[in-house]
Amino acid sequence: MIRVLIADDHAVVRQGLKMIFALCPDIEVLAEAVDGDGIIQHLRGTTDFNLLLMDMNMPGVSGIGLIERIKMCRKTLPILVFSMQNDPHIVVRALKSGASGYIAKDKDPAILLEAIRKVADGGKYIDPVVAEQMVFEGLSNEQSVPHAHLSDRELEVFRLLVVGKGVNEIADQLIISNKTVSSHKKRLMEKMHFSGMADLMRYAVQRRLFDDVNQG
C-alpha cells in the first residue's frame, strides 16, 4: 500500500487528487498539508508515509528550501513534486535537493498514478515534456538564462518578492535577518540586470517560474 501525504495549498487540487486515489486499491491518502510547516508537523509525527506528493510553491517556506528541510526530517521519504512549473532549471534544482520525481499538474491522471507508483517503489520520474526541454537546453548550452545563475536562496527570495512579500516578511518566513534578505535582493537584481520590481514580475510571468505568480 502506498501511504501518501498530499501537500498543496489549493483545496480543489487536494480534493481532486483524493477522488482519483479513492479509485486505486494500492494508494491511501493518510494526511494533507497546505504549507511547509504542515508537512513538517506531519513528518515529525508517527504516521508512516512512504510518499510525499507536494506542490513546489506554497505559503511559507517553499520550493528548494522546503525539500531540503523535508529530507533533513525524513531522509528516505520519496518526494514527488506536482507543480505547474515547467522550467527545467528549477526542476533540476528540486531533484538535486532530494526530490525523487517531478510531474506537471496538467498531466492525465493515469500518468500521475504511474509516476506515484514508480517513485514510491524507489524509482525516479521526470515529466517527459520537462525531460525533453532539459535535453535540448543541454544540447544548445542554454545555461545562460539569467535565473540559472541565482543561488537557491536568491531564487526563493525572488519568488517571495514577486508574490508581494516585503523584506521584513521574507526575513520572518525564511528565518534570516532583514539585512541578509536585502543582500540577497541586491545580488539577484544585479545578476538579473533588473532595475526594479516591475522587471522581476514581468520576468517571472513570462518565464512561468512560479505557480503562485501565474495563478495570482
Image: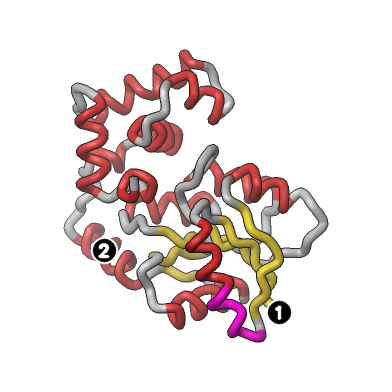
Pair 2/1: label in front: 1
Is 202 colored magenta in this rendering? no
Query: How far apart in space, not on screen, are marks 2 and 1 (Cα)?
Result: 33 Å
Kind of element beneath mark 1? loop
Range covered by the magenta-colored residues: 19-25
Pick the front one: 10 or 118: 10
Mark number for residue 198? none
Name the quadrant of the C terminus.
top left
Mark number for residue 1? 1
Q: Residue at x 41, y 34 (%)?
A: 160
| 2 w.r.t. 186: above or below | below
Where is residue 48? Give x, y as percent.
77, 64
Task: Name which quarter of the figure residue 139 lies in.
Answer: bottom left
Q: Residue at x 51, y 41 (%)?
A: 59
Name the quadrant of the N terminus.
bottom right
Amino acid type of the residue tagged 2 in the rendering: Gln
Residue assigned mark 2: 133
Kind of element beneath mark 2? helix
Q: In this view, which residue lies farthest toward the right?
A: 46
Q: Number of labelled discs?
A: 2
Q: In this view, which residue lies farthest toward the top?
A: 179
Q: Residue at x 45, y 63 (%)?
A: 102
Is 21 colored magenta in this rendering? yes
Where is residue 79? Give x, y as percent.
57, 61
Where is residue 46? Give x, y as percent.
82, 57
Task: Name which quarter of the figure residue 164 lies in.
Answer: top left
Where is residue 203? Give x, y as percent.
22, 39
| 35 w.r.t. 77: above or below | above
Amino acid type of the residue tagged 1 in the rendering: Met
Q: Residues within 10 Å of mark 1 (few under 14, many from 20)?
A: few
